[in-house]
Amino acid sequence: MNKFFSLIILGCSLIVTVSCSSEHIEGEKIPLKNNQINNNHTLSFTAVSNGCSQNSDFSIHVNRQEKDTAFISIVRIKKDLCRRLPFFQAFQLNIPSNLFNKTLVIQNPTAQALTKNNN
């Protein structure tokens, strides 16, 4: 019974998180192995792929903005349906122009090493 209530609370918190966004983008916040904000207004990151992921499968989600800071997440908006064993792959997204002059804080969780047990 405790697990049931935990799942309900988790589900409700996810709904609240998505509905409170400034840009409504449905998707899953993904763990990142590393990330880097580049001088050419792009964001590079490494995430798990099964072989069919592309840059266009991800989007930048603005969680909240303050005066000089934007708290963002990388979300997967299209599932990778390939059946290959998962591996880390590099991706790159363009940073929206309204975020150019802000300090970006990326709020994704850190990816764990891939092992046979967590595939």
Image: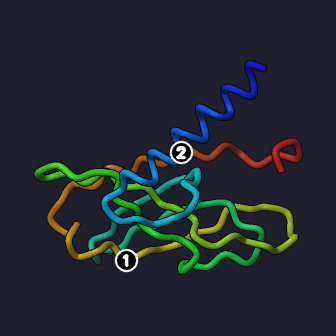
User: Could you tell me which residue is drawn at 63 percent across and 73 percent down?
Assistant: 78
Amino acid type, label 1: Asn
Q: Which residue is mark 1?
A: 94
Amino acid type, label 2: Leu
Distance between the alpha carbons at the discs numbered 2 and 1: 26 Å
User: Could you tell me which residue is drawn at 40 percent across and 60 percent down?
Assistant: 36
Eyeballing the image, is 97 above or below 102?
below
Q: Are marks 2 and 1 in contact (CB under 8 Å)?
A: no
Residue 77 percent location from the top left of the image: 57, 70
In depth, the one of 48 and 70 nearer the eye is 70
**Of the numbered discs in the image, which one, if any, rests on residue 81?**
none
User: Could you tell me which residue is drawn at 71 percent across and 66 percent down?
Assistant: 49
Q: Quadrant of the N terminus?
A: top right
Badge 2 marks a residue whose secondary structure is helix
Q: Earlier in the sequence, mark 2 or mark 1?
A: 2
Eyeballing the image, is 88 above or below 52?
above
Residue 95 percent location from the top left of the image: 32, 72
Eyeballing the image, is 25 above or below 68?
below
In the picture, residue 100 is in which quadrant? bottom left
User: Could you tell me which residue is drawn at 45 percent across and 45 percent down?
Assistant: 16
In depth, the one of 88 and 54 nearer the eye is 54
Q: Which residue is mark 2?
A: 14
Residue projecting furthest to the left: 67
Q: Is residue 101 left or right of residue 113?
A: left
